[in-house]
Image (cartoon, grey):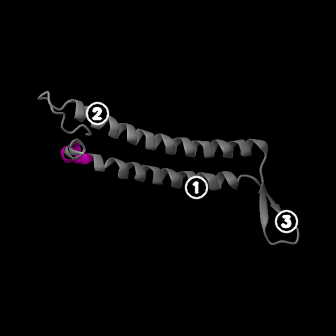
Amino acid sequence: MKAASDYVRSTMSVFLLPPVTVVFLLCFYVYWAITSVYLVSSGEAKQIKDVPFGTFEFDTTLKRLLIYHLFGLLWLNAFAIAATQFIIASSVCLWYFSQGTGQGATKTIR
């Protein structure tokens, strides 16, 4: 617990990384949502009989594109979270294993 508190005290910039990741992901979610609306509206519009609403019919290519688009969302989300965890973990590693040798690594996250 002491080492963790020493790390946080010496590397305060570690608190900036998660909010930066959240802002990046929020921007990506907005882009993804707008792109999804365009993809869904690319289908062929069909009127339902006796109902004031309609529906979209998708061909096979568009269905596959929508699945690919969803996979891209999930993959980029997982990648951004994993990259953030890796950066924090490697920063802690660099800081921890450079202690006691007289070469204390300060500012491991720049």
Q: Which residue is drawn at the image coordinates 85% and 65% (left, top)?
A: 48
Q: Is residue 110 left or right of residue 74?
A: left
Judged from the image, the secondary structure of the residue bearing numbered disc 2 is helix
Judged from the image, the secondary structure of the residue bearing numbered disc 1 is helix
Range drawn in magenta: 7-13
- Residue bearing the label numbered 2: 93
Screen quadrant of the N terminus: top left
Residue 37 position, x and y percent, is 64, 56
* Disc 1 and disc 2 in contact, CB within 8 angstroms: no
Indicate the amino acid at tag 1: Ile
Screen quadrant of the C terminus: top left
* Disc 3 and disc 1 in contact, CB within 8 angstroms: no
- Residue bearing the label numbered 3: 48
Q: Which residue is drawn at the image coordinates 80% and 72% (left, top)?
A: 52
Label 3 Cα neighbours within 10 Å, binned few <14 / some 14-19 / many ≥20: few
- Residue bearing the label numbered 1: 34
Disc nearest the viewer among 2 and 3: 2
Question: Which residue occupies the foreground of this view, 33 or 86?
Answer: 86
Q: Is residue 88 left or right of residue 53?
A: left
- When the figure is inspected, residue 2 is found, relative to residue 38, above or below; the finding is above
